[in-house]
Image (cartoon, helix red, strand yellow):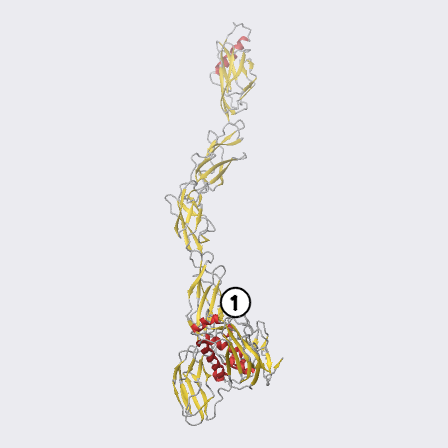
Amino acid sequence: MKFTVSMRAVPMLLAFAFSVGCDGGGGTTAPRTPGAVAIVTGGSQSATVGAPVAAAPSVVVTDTEGRPMSGVAVTFAVASGGGSVTGGSATTNGSGVATAGSWTLGTSAGANSLTASAAGLPAVTFSATGIAGPPAALIVSAGSGQAAVAGSALGIAPAVLVRDAFANPVANVTVSFAVASGSGSVAQASPTTNASGIASTPWILGTAAGTNTMNVSAGTLAPVTITATGIAGTAASVTRTSAVTVSGVVGGAPAELPRAVVRDANGNGVANTPVVFAVTAGGGTLTGASATTDVSGTATVGGWTLGTIAGTQTVTATAPGLAPAIFTANAAPGAPSAMAISAAALPTGPAGEPLTVLPAVIMRDAFGNPVPNVTVTFTVVAGGGALGGAAPSTNVLGIATLTSWTLGNAVGSNVVRASATGVTPVNFTVAGIAGPPSSLTIGAGNAQSAAPGSAVAIAPSVFLRDRFGNAVSNAGVTFAVTGGGGAVTGATQVTTTAGAATVGSWTLGAVAGSNTLSVQSAGVPAITFTATGTTSPLPAGNYNITVRYATPPSARQQLAVDRAVARWEQVITGDLQNIPANLPAGSCGASSAALSETIDDLLIFVDFGIIDGVGQILGQAGPCFIRTADGLPIIGTVQLDGADLARLEADGSIDAVVLHEIGHVLGIGSLWENQGLLAFASTDTVSFTGVNTGTAFRGIPGNTFLGQSTPVENCVGLNGCGQGTRDSHWRELVLGRELMTGFISPSGQTNPLSLMTIESLGDMGYLVNRGAADPFILGAGLWADGNDRTIELAEIKPSFRIRRMDTDGRIRQ
């Protein structure tokens, strides 16, 4: 510390020296009195707080005449600043000077004072300034823990205080402010502490809401951290946080509910903002449509039930003053609920040919929406056609179209069923009609004989068929004489629904010999009938049937019997050996009379008495006695319940019933097994094995049966066929209306006596007239027509045992 002495003190010292020098000369002086205390050194200094000043404080004591006085006690005492002094009690030396040991300043920066006093004299004061020591600590003084809108400056600039070891502010210290998190910025990165030891800088927070931190350091001092929170600003937008587009099923909830976030200009979520959700397309409904954003600025609708119309559905989320956010759901159709016809096939099509217009179905859910991607299975359920291609799936319009459908080869109803899981199937029905004519075949009346110039007994008839053997109706057929010189009536005909055309009549030429008749129809080869004009007697009437009634018949009943007898006598032409019969009453049924006569071919006992009342057993019929030589019938019985005949007489069915029952007496069905012509009896595959019958069966137009033998009734598919029906009739499901099936067609419909039945008689041993067959085609049978099975021939087989009779009328086992 620099030591200074005032100029005024120098003469005093000199004078004092001089006086002493004089006293030294041995003179005497009067006693002196201290007159003043004055600072000699250390009057105004500065030093680091808590440290001693450089110059120890000293004073000079003078007497009243200004002369230094020695030996005067001087007290040094700290007056302010809190420091300390050593050697505080001192005595002036010979120069009148007293010096303190040391003066240590207080620990607080600023003014310090020390007084020096001597008894009776005014004290003098030393002053010193305490200067802060080196930086020892860095503390936050202001601005930490504030909140401000993200991206803006804090209201209070962050500040730190640099202190020395005694907590005194330290000025002129360079402080470093560095943003640690939040991506904000500072205005001054390295300010210097001011006189108060404070350094500060403005701080602009980062744009993201949340915590911002700043690290502050100064030299080697322990750094400090200042924190601030960026909060969201004013709402500026509403955006989606859920998926842009979600999926769902009509009438249900989407996979994800709409969730919106309200953000400020910097993209921070704004809490406590009202958001209103609303359906804008699709007709759905919402719950919890009014929501308030949470701390993240997010609001979620309570629930969304999609509308019932498949397709795009939308919901908007709106906050005050802001453009809405739009949410989209793709509402898919629900599960298939119903299937309906979308496109029907043409009502008719050529049998055996593919359809040009194919059926299609449409699949809908419970709300009527088309359902795509549903596999639809098409199957043939009637008609025997064929389908092509894999099972289609519904397209985006819910429509599945059959790939291909070839109708069955037979004329009649074709049905395809469309089915899919969980829905009611749909049927498509197409009537297979005959295709273009392909062939003409002879039906009846070929190879006849008649007297020259007379008409043949059976008017020639033909069948016009397509390539599958189906009858072609409404087609023109022309009959023309091509040899023999005869003539025809009704030369131009139109085929019936059975494809048949019959000339009005054919009168042979006047000269005996060959006659020919040509038949033509457009587009098919012509065919030729032949006939012989002859003067020889004809063999007609060679087979005779005699009838005996047990009870008198009504006129209508007798007419039916007469017609049946005449028809069978026309069919069977070969005479059989006459046999004498001598039998007691009851030999052929309880009502049969005693016999003593020769039988010419066949005797039938007919009984129209009551059996069991209306609607039960219709009757029984069959042979009682057969010939030993050939196994053909001699005597038989027909019993029909008179209680059931009234209805048959009224609608005309009695003719077919009686004709049918006499057929059993002739051996049809009743003698098949006897003669070894029945295979697999009482099984599902029972069949008639006669060769000629099989040929005729396979030649029936429209026949699609795959078996080689002629099918016999097996009762499969019939609701409990009547007694005696199994194994003794043609199979109804195959042969339909043919006379000798187990069912008779209702009034107004024919029951053809086909060539097949005539051939079965031939296979049994009869000589038959094949030209007597009725025209007959398949595809128009009882079952094929649906529900026209009105008369079931509920028969019982005769209870008596069939016995054999030799040519002499003797009974054989």
Is residue 529 placed above or below 315 in the rendered structure?
Answer: below
Direction right: furthest residue: 813
Is residue 524 placed above or below 280 in the rendered structure?
Answer: below
Q: Is residue 789 visible?
A: no
Is residue 709 placed above or below 177 in the rendered structure?
Answer: below
- Between 796 and 424, which is closer to the camera in this rendering? 796
Residue 351: which quarter of the image?
Answer: bottom left
Q: Is residue 426 visible?
A: yes
**In the figure, is residue 276 to the left or right of 68?**
left
- Between 166 and 19, which is closer to the camera in this rendering? 166
Q: How many other residues sit within 10 Å of disc 1, few (<14), some (14-19) or many (≥20)?
A: few
Which quarter of the rendered picture does the C terminus lie within? bottom right
Secondary structure of the residue carrying numbered label 1: loop
- Total numbered circles: 1
Residue 152 lies, in percent from the top left, at 42, 39
Residue 805 lies, in percent from the top left, at 59, 82
Residue bearing mark 1: 719
- Between 353 and 4, which is closer to the camera in this rendering? 353
- Between 550 and 801, which is closer to the camera in this rendering? 550
Direction bottom: furthest residue: 511
Residue 353 lies, in percent from the top left, at 46, 74
**Label 1 sits on what residue type?**
Asn
Residue 143 lies, in percent from the top left, at 46, 33
